[in-house]
Image (cartoon, helix red, strand yellow):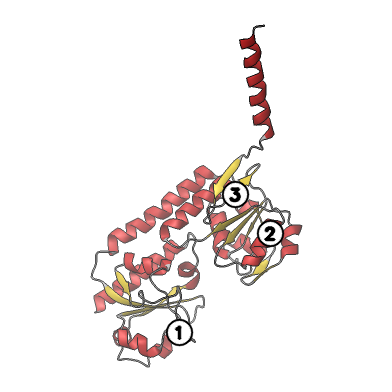
Amino acid sequence: MGKAGIGFRILISIALFAFGSVKSFAVEVADDRGVGVLLDSPARRVVALAPHLTEILFHIRGGDRLVGVMDHSDFPAAAQSLPRVGTHNRLDIEAILALKPDLIVGWGSGNPPQDIALLERLGLPVFISEPRAVADIGTLMRRLGTLIDEASFARQRAADFEKGVNDLAVRYSNRRRLRVFFQVWEQPLYTLNREHIVSELIADCGGANIFADLAGLSPVVSLEAVIARDPQVIVGGSSADALPAWVKRWREWPSVTAVRLGQIHVINADHIGRMGPRLLDGMRALCNAIDQARNAV
């Protein structure tokens, strides 16, 4: 064999050695930190570290992969029987390790950072999500679908969700804009600024968040500040069937336009407060509430 042939064989050998020495991954997806999550094969044992992540995984046909969830992961009903691995301020690391997960799906602002760092130091693949806009939810569905080998189904689910949101925005966003106060909590009085996803929903429903300009994602405001900005609609969440006490207390302030016109609306807190597929239901209820007020003003 000539020198050219020997050289060619050496190059092929070097190439084969190089490819064989580099670990290949079946799945690679970047999370919201920009960190690549690498899996040898699609995830089959998943721990979800927030109720909305549990909902999304069930929604994209990943419920049978879930082996552990957080407290308050109560939807769908099948989630209620899954092992609990922590609360909003503490993860049960031992319980998580005992479940032998091949993927952990976390929530950037909702999980203790020191616990997430420990899980990563222990060598567990951790995908961190941080949805801040409505569009992020569809993106999250697609990414998780890839990680659990349900990419095609997740894409369809994401497209359906995005179409529902867009249809509502087209229908309501250009209608007469009303001043909206969104109440997160009563004592102290918490609301949301423009950076929160709910403020985006208010705008898409044809409303204007009266505290969009404040600093901090969930600022505390005074009763006097709400009265001064005089909302035409007051909206808050509740998981109870009975009328929340905060509605009754607002009725003591008829000088506020929303109170005088009877435009105090309660939305299912799990729909409007969880960044998952049921946010579409929350948006629908929010748009209906603002539109009712529009007809009353």
Secondary-structure class at tag 1: loop
Identity, as a three-letter code, of the amino acid under mark 3: Val
Measure the alpha-carbon separation of dots 2 and 3.
13 Å
- Is disc 2 placed on a helix, strand or loop? helix
Residue topped by disc 2: 119
Which secondary structure, mark 3?
strand
Q: Residues within 10 Å of mark 1 (few under 14, many from 20)?
A: some
243 is higher (above) or lower (below) than 14:
below
> For the residue marked with disc 1, what is the amino acid?
Leu
Crowding around mark 3 (Cα neighbors within 10 Å: few <14, some 14 to 19, many 20+) is some
Question: Residue 120, image x and y in percent?
Answer: 67, 57
Which is more toward the observer, 25 or 167? 25
Mark 2 burial class by Cα count in 10 Å: few <14, some 14-19, many 20+: some
Q: Find residue 266 and report its horizontal and vertical position in percent.
A: 42, 77
Residue positioned 63% across, 40% down in the render:
25
Tell me whether circle 3 and circle 1 mark residues in contact (CB < 8 Å).
Answer: no
Q: Nearer the viewer, mark 3 or mark 1?
A: 3
Q: Amino acid at mark 2?
A: Leu
Q: Position of residue 59 (x, y in %)?
A: 53, 54
Asked if residue 69 shows in the view, the reply is: no
Residue marked by disc 1: 189
In this view, the mark in front (2 or 1):
2
Estimate the spatial distance between the alpha carbons at disc 3 and disc 1, rounded to whole Å: 39 Å
Between residue 118 and residue 29, name the one nearer to us.
118
Asked if residue 219 lies left or right of residue 17, the reply is left
Q: Position of residue 181 (x, y in %)?
A: 36, 79
Q: Against 230, is 57 above or below?
A: above
Q: Answer with mark 2 or mark 1, whichever residue precedes in sequence.
A: 2
Q: Which residue is mark 3?
A: 37
Spot the residue most to the front. Answer: 3
- Residue at image coords 48%, 86%: 188
